[in-house]
Image (cartoon, coloured by chain):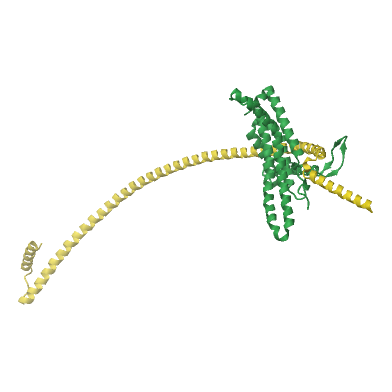
Chain colours: A green, B yellow
Amino acid sequence: MHSPMEQFEIKRLLDFHIGSLDASYTNSALWMTIAVILAFLLFVVGTQKKALIPGRTQAMAELGYEFVAGMLRDNVGEAGKKYFPFVLTLFVFILFCNVLGLVPYSFTPTSHIIVTFAMAAVVFVGVTVIGFARHGAHFLTFFVPSGVPLWLLVILVPIEIISYFVRPFSLSIRLFANMLAGHTMLKVFGGFVVMMGVLGGWAPLAFIVILTGLELLIAFLQAYVFAILTCLYLNDAIHLHH
Amino acid sequence: MRKPVYSMLAAALVAGASRAAMAESGGMPQLNFHDFAPQVVWLVISFVVLYLVMSKLAIPTISDTLERRQGRIQSDLDAAEKASEETRALVAAYEKRLADAREQARRLHREQAEADSAAASARLTELGNALNARIDEAEKRIAGQRAQVVEGLEDMAHDIAAEVYSKVSGQPADGTALRAKVAAAHSGKNGGGR
């Protein structure tokens, strides 16, 4: 019986190093590449016709485009337009990695904490840089809630700072844990199907069907959550709302 | 004999330990630090490639398409608004012409009716006059014929009286005396009868 964790093993398909840096092409890299190629096919090849009345592929690409554009417009406003390519890339990349991970025998790059953390760290650093670039030292007032008595600030300011620095962790762990848990569950119940045989295996099999539907929803939802939280952090950095 | 047994035992122990170690580390492939670098390297590469694809190819194309569509929809809406404006003007013009035509028709009808009734009454009086003339003429004629008939009746009465007298008396009647008697009887009857 395979361990349910085996699906998360990193396998080196092509070994190579740049100096001391291990840059081997792994199964994770393969599925990232597939995600990028599929995104290219959908968003570039699928929209080349520029039809006034879009076909299915073009409508899908436009739907994704307008979905993220609307998200950014609603949460950040006009100032967020500059960051639209980044947020769209983030959303599409995570969505494609998540959904492709549901294909049997595939690999889910977003089920690895290092991948999600790298993306969350880019968002965190980027947002912090944008905050300081826009407001200078004034950005620090973001940690000071307004209209609060002084003695309460002594408690609240450290909490605000901690909650700010927790962001990359919560952002990355949320996505990683969702992917990990979902895929592990699928694998565990897959094991049950085998274990319970032809007679008893139907119940866990039926459950897997339902679970796969749920996982599809979660795959989309987590991409959405990652993107919308990025929007909210951007909004904080740009407008200093509190 | 003992050596192979020991070595086999050692091998089994090593195998068991390594399996346990694999299970330990295999429990969470995500925490295998050796795999971090290749993942991050290829994450950066694929993310940057996707970013370039999106920002340089996909977004300009899609936003261009969406703008063109929006422009087309707006121009269509404007055209529809203009057409509806024109229709409204046409309808107003049509209704004005219709009202004018109706007014004119009413006037013509009234004039015609007046002219008709004047002509009709003129003809009616003319006809009435002609009829009256004919009635007068007919009455005159009737009166003349009546006088003749009455005269004829008197002659016939004299003849019958003379005939009756001659048959009864057996001698010819004296015409003049008889005529006077008939006239007296006739006038007496006439005075009482009518």
Relative to B88, is B140 on the left or the right? left
Where does the image place residue A119, in percent across and percent down from the top left?
Answer: 74, 36
Residue for point 27% across, 52% down: B128
Where does the image place residue B74, in percent across and percent down from the top left?
Answer: 61, 38
Nearer to the camera, A87 or B81: A87
Nearer to the camera, A17 or B84: A17
Nearer to the camera, A114 or A104: A114
Relative to B131, is B175 on the left or the right? left
Q: Residue A161: which quarter of the image?
A: top right
Residue for point 67% across, 46% down: A217
Residue for point 44% across, 41% down: B99
**Above or below, B60 relative to B105:** above
**Above or below, A205 relative to B38:** below
Asked whether the viewer can see residue A100, the reply is yes
Where does the image place residue A131, in percent across and percent down from the top left?
Answer: 69, 27
Where does the image place residue B117, in percent across and percent down from the top left?
Answer: 33, 47
Relative to B188, is B77 on the left or the right? right
**Above or below, A145 relative to B8:** above
Image quarter (top left, top right, bottom left or bottom right) of the C terminus of chain A: top right
Q: Kindly give the residue lying farthest to the front in the view shown.
A: B2
